Image (cartoon, rainbow, N blue to C red):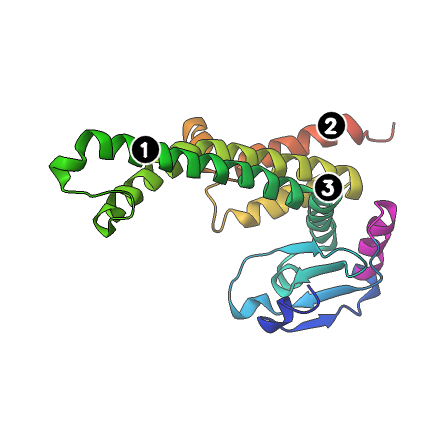
Amino acid sequence: PVYIAPLFNTYVKLDDARIKDPILSMARANGIPASEVYVMDASRQTTRVSANVSGFLGIERITLNDNLLKRCTLPEIEATMGHEMGHYVLNHAYKAVLFFGVLTVFGFAFMRWGIGWALARYGDRWHLRGVDDVAALPLLALLLGIYGFVLTPITNSYSRSQEYEADIFGLNASGQPDGEALVDLKLGDYRKLDPGPVEELLFFDHPSGRTRIYAAMRWKAEHLHPSP
């Protein structure tokens, strides 16, 4: 976040204490050692609202994009930052590296087995000399495509589980279920809000907007009780 990210966007410190102070308060409450909040000029590339908490070993940085500032209220910003802090505190990035690393190892094993089987069965017919034959590249591409297709619902389900965990963490950290629901509606600008269950299972790497709004309202019903 300190050396690479600024190569692609401009980062400035957020001076608005009304927004910065609640974010830093959440960070301190959850053990995130950040003393500043930064804003990046993401609007040059996209209209999406987003934020992130990144870095390690003393260079942690809390960043929100300028679309979030322009399009969202303070409760929405707090809900978004709570979600991103969830990813950081729950070590989702490290877990994802391990998960996808294991899948990559299995992928190499599948490719080795698949091309060995195909060459033994069809090599002569296809005039392939071996795995090092450049003519075998289409076969390798086919096997890779099959592996990726089969893994799609698995990797998407894993990603959705992390996003759901971060959603719940964010609700507990920010206490802003209405803010979470409103942000989810804004995300509907580029994500289908209410896909069918099979579509969500197979093709969505985030919970659908409907799923997330329902979870936020359920959290609200269970945790925020109106005064008598």
Query: Is residue 192 toward the left or the right of residue 62 in the image?
Result: left
Closer-to-camera residue (85/46)? 85
Amino acid type of the residue tagged 3 in the rendering: Gly
Closer-to-camera residue (213/145)? 145
Camera-side mark, 1 or 3:
1
Q: Is residue 206 visible?
A: no
Gap between marks 3 and 2, in whole Å?
16 Å
Q: Main secondary structure of the magenta part?
A: helix
* Region of the chain picked out in magenta, as a range: 20-32
Q: How many marks?
A: 3
The residue positioned farthest toward the front in the image shown:
129
Residue drawn at (42%, 30%) of the image: 196
Residue drawn at (14%, 42%) of the image: 127
Residue drawn at (35%, 32%) of the image: 113
> In x, y percent, where is residue 176?
74, 42
Magenta highlight on residue 57: no
Above/below status of 126 relative to 47: above
Q: Which residue is mark 2?
A: 221
